Amino acid sequence: MSSFFWLLLYLAPLLGLTAAIFGWLGWRWSGSDLKKRIAELEKGLLSLSAAEQLAEQERDAAQAEVLSASQEAANLLRKRNDELARVQGELESAHSEARRRRDETTKAQEALQAQEAEINRLLAELDAAREEIQRLRTAPPIETPVGPDAPEPPPEKPKRKRMPAAKTKPVTAHRGAAIQDTLTSLEERLSAQQSTLEGLSRELEDWQRRVATLEAQPTADPAGLALAYRSLADSEKRLQEASVDKERMQGQVSVLKKVSEAAAALEPVPDDDLTRIKGIKNVISDQLRSHGIRTWRQIALWNDDELRTFSELLAFRNRATREKWKQQARELHESVHGPLT
């Protein structure tokens, strides 16, 4: 037992030294692996830092490219807007010029109609004067007794200007001819307006197809689409105006046909002095007579269509309404001819 105890005491330092050697070797081995791992981690960290710097450089370059592209897009958009504004200004100028020319054409047509009415009136008066001259030429001469027993000639009466007969057939014929000429002119203009309407309808359909094509394109063209929209709206507006003009001319044709049909029944009715209506002077009176309006009763019985038609044909606009021609005509008729029936 004592020998075994002494053996353990002898082996204890040796075992402790062995354990210390193995512990030192383990520490050295684990320390080399840790340094290697740290070195790998530092290397990876450097790689990540380099990648991060490269990503930042790429990000800055991309931002610069985006900023440059945005500036180019803004410049291009500004140029297109300027071009669009210029084109819009030119279109508005062209539309204004077209409206001005259309107004001038309308005024010229109204002036031409007034001149035609005046010419028809003068022709009627000329025919009446020719009839009067022919009647005087064909009248038998008056025999005057000669000698001392001849009666003294009566004192000469002051000559009165002879007005053209209002109820002679030539005048009536020319009145009817004036209405027929106006009707013929209106029907020709109506036919031309129908052709214009057909052309505008085709133009409108063409712009509608263009707008649909532009809207269906995968790449949008804002400038072209805006121009197509404006052209489409302009075509619709001009088509609407042409339709209104057509309806206006159809109303005029309807009214003049009604007046022409009633002219035969009014032949035995004497003419009234239309100039007694405040606002109707000789020129307008002659124009009304050339279009079959000869009596106060006709003016008093005007409906809205007839009032509008004669206002447009004779270019006295809203004077008839403002000066109450219908009311004046009714009062004149009832004061001279009795109640209006």
Image (spheres, rainbow, N blue to C red):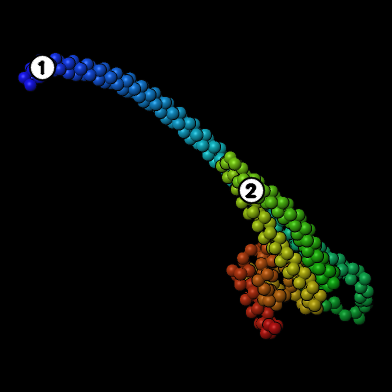
Report crowding for label 1: few under 14, some 14 to 19, many 20 or more residues within 10 A (C-alpha).
Answer: few
Task: State the separation of the CA atoms marked 2 and 1.
Answer: 111 Å
Image spot of residue 197 (x, y percent): 72, 55
Which comes before the other along the chain, label 2 or label 1? 1
Residue 144 visible to the viewer: yes
Residue placed at 51% from the left, 37% from the top? Answer: 77
Residue placed at 66% from the left, 82% from the top? Answer: 335
Image spot of residue 190 (x, y percent): 75, 59
Q: Nearer the viewer, residue 278 or 266?
A: 266
Q: Residue lying farthest front?
A: 1
Q: Nearer the viewer, residue 28 or 226?
A: 28
Report crowding for label 2: few under 14, some 14 to 19, many 20 or more residues within 10 A (C-alpha).
Answer: few
Q: Amino acid at mark 1?
A: Leu
Image spot of residue 250 (x, y percent): 73, 64
> The N terminus is located in which quarter?
top left
Q: Nearer the viewer, residue 42 or 260?
A: 42
At numbered mark 1, what does the secondary structure look like: helix, strand or loop? helix
Residue placed at 63% from the left, 63% from the top? Answer: 317
Q: Amino acid at mark 2?
A: Ala
The residue labelled by disc 2 is 212
Q: Relative to residue 335, is residue 193 depicted above or below?
A: above
Residue 9 visible to the viewer: no
The residue labelled by disc 1 is 7
Q: Relative to residue 245, is residue 143 depicted above or below?
A: below
Residue placed at 81% from the left, 68% from the top? Answer: 176
Q: Relative to residue 239, is residue 86 depicted above or below?
A: above
Q: Nearer the viewer, residue 111 or 165?
A: 111
At numbered mark 2, what does the secondary structure look like: helix, strand or loop? helix
Image spot of residue 167 (x, y percent): 81, 74
Q: Is residue 74 left or right of residue 314?
A: left
